[in-house]
């Protein structure tokens, strides 16, 4: 594991701002990731799309087709070796675009990324993952409560 970390640090990402995103699902959804690789693939794709949208919208000057640079690491166990399928995503803190005329690649840093955007990513992933699980028949129609305890509080001006 230390060799992979050293290789990643020395040779993979360019010397640009980097952020780690961790996606962990509620306990009742984790077995689907553990035993159905196609579900884990869908969940990771949902997460990456939400991160890409947040980075694009917070990177001044980035075009709509800008792309992210990211590496994901699925982990199947927690720190006490308990079964806990989750993802670690290392994503550059911005997006890349290509100049159509010259082909030059430009990095647009996500200089406007703020905690409110992290919550938007969280809500988008939550909504899309629950929809994906329901569409595949993996959740009952009233199972939206799977994430109820960890959902961010709604933003309202009254108590």
Image (tube, grey):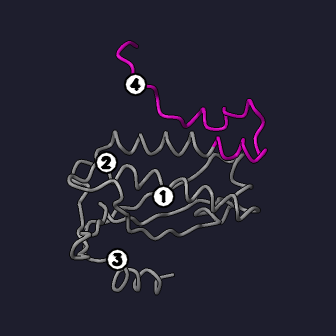
Question: Which residue is identified by label 4?
Answer: 155
Question: Which residue is identified by label 3?
Answer: 13
Question: Which residue is identified by label 1?
Answer: 48
Q: In the rendered view, does 159 fall on the left or right side of 102?
A: right
- Image point (78%, 36%), residue name: 140
Which is more N-terminal, label 1 or label 4? 1
Closer mark to the observer between disc 3 and disc 2:
2
Q: Mark 4 and mark 1: span between their CA atoms?
A: 25 Å
Label 2 element class:
helix
Q: Mark 2 and mark 1: span between their CA atoms?
A: 14 Å
Residue 49 x/y as whole percent: 48, 54
Question: Which residue is identified by label 2?
Answer: 57
Residue 123 x/y as whole percent: 49, 39
Q: Is residue 75 magenta?
A: no
Classed neighbour count for the residue bearing mark 2: other residues with Cα under 10 Å, few (<14), some (14–19), many (≥20)? some
Residue 125 x/y as whole percent: 53, 46
Closer mark to the observer between disc 1 and disc 3:
1
Which is more N-terminal, label 3 or label 4? 3
Label 4 element class:
loop
Classed neighbour count for the residue bearing mark 1: other residues with Cα under 10 Å, few (<14), some (14–19), many (≥20)? many
Magenta stretch in the rendered image: 130-159
Numbered label attached to residue 15: none
Q: Quadrant of residue 33?
A: bottom right
Please name whichever residue, 137 or 15, is drawn nearer the observer in this view of the structure. Answer: 137
Which is more N-terminal, label 4 or label 2? 2
Q: Name the chief secondary structure element in magenta.
A: loop
């Amino acid at each position: 594991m230390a060799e992979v970390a050293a290789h990643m640090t020395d040779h993979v990402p360019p010397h640009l701002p980097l952020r780690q995103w961790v996606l962990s699902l509620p306990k009742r959804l984790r077995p689907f990731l553990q035993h159905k690789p196609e579900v884990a693939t869908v969940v990771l794709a949902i997460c990456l799309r939400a991160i890409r949208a947040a980075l694009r919208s917070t990177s001044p000057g980035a075009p709509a087709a800008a792309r992210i640079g990211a590496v994901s690491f699925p982990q199947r166990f927690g720190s006490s070796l308990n079964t806990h399928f989750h993802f670690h995503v290392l994503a550059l803190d911005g997006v890349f675009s290509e100049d159509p005329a010259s082909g030059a690649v430009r990095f647009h840093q996500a200089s406007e990324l703020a905690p409110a955007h992290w919550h938007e990513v969280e809500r988008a992933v939550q909504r899309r993952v629950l929809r994906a699980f329901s569409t595949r028949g993996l959740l009952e129609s009233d199972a939206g409560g799977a994430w109820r305890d960890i959902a961010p509080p709604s933003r309202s001006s009254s108590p």
